[in-house]
Image (cartoon, grey):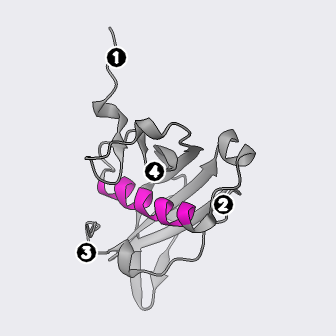
Amino acid sequence: MAAEGKAGWTLEYTSLKSFTYPMPETRFFHAGVNLYKFKIKYGNTISINSNLDENIVSKELQNAIRVVLGNLDNLCPFTTEHLIIFPYLHKWERVSDLKFMHGNEFLTPYPFVCTIYVELNSSKQNKCEDEGEYRDFCNSVSIAS
């Protein structure tokens, strides 16, 4: 499954520096001429149970970033095999004052910061075996009025 960004960027073919799991970090990703700012924060369950393999976390975070980029207009929590991802958007303050370049090309920053809170998925039964890489909580939770 090659998840493509709006400008044809694929994270699969991009070599990423390892994530600083379990320490929070800020990352910038660009897709064509678009630039996205991501803040990655880990919850208490990650800090307590830090024996999770960093390569597994890195792979699942890359997939989670793909999912977030593909669903910016309709974000909701989802799971991977080992993680629960809570994505949020908030206004990127003063982004209009900043200029970004990659090579000789100016990049257009996305006006929101993508913050993802990462928790440990301790309940393996939450993973849908036939639904691919992640489970969409928006389609599995009913809210009573």
Residue 124 higher or lower than 115, as above or below: above
At label 4, the amino acid type is: Glu
Characterize the local packing of mark 4: few (<14), some (14-19) or many (20 or more) Cα atoms within 10 angstroms.
many
Mark 2 or mark 4, which has the lower sequence index?
Answer: 2
Q: Mark 2 = which residue?
A: 21
Q: Mark 3 = which residue?
A: 8
Q: Is residue 110 visible?
A: no
Residue 90 percent coordinates (x, y)? 49, 44
In this image, 110 relative to 71: left or right? right
Mark 3 or mark 2, which has the lower sequence index?
Answer: 3
**Quadrant, the N terminus:** bottom left
In this image, 75 relative to 94: left or right? left
Tag 3–tag 4 contact (CB < 8 Å): no
Tag 2–tag 1 contact (CB < 8 Å): no
Q: Please provide the residue range marked out in magenta.
A: 56-70
Furthest residue in direction bottom, as rendered: 104
Report the front residue among 92 and 32.
32
Residue 114 percent coordinates (x, y)? 48, 52
Q: For marks 3 and 2, give the one nearer the viewer.
A: 2
Q: For marks 4 and 1, give the one nearer the viewer.
A: 4
Q: For marks 3 and 4, give the one nearer the viewer.
A: 4
Q: For marks 2 and 4, give the one nearer the viewer.
A: 4
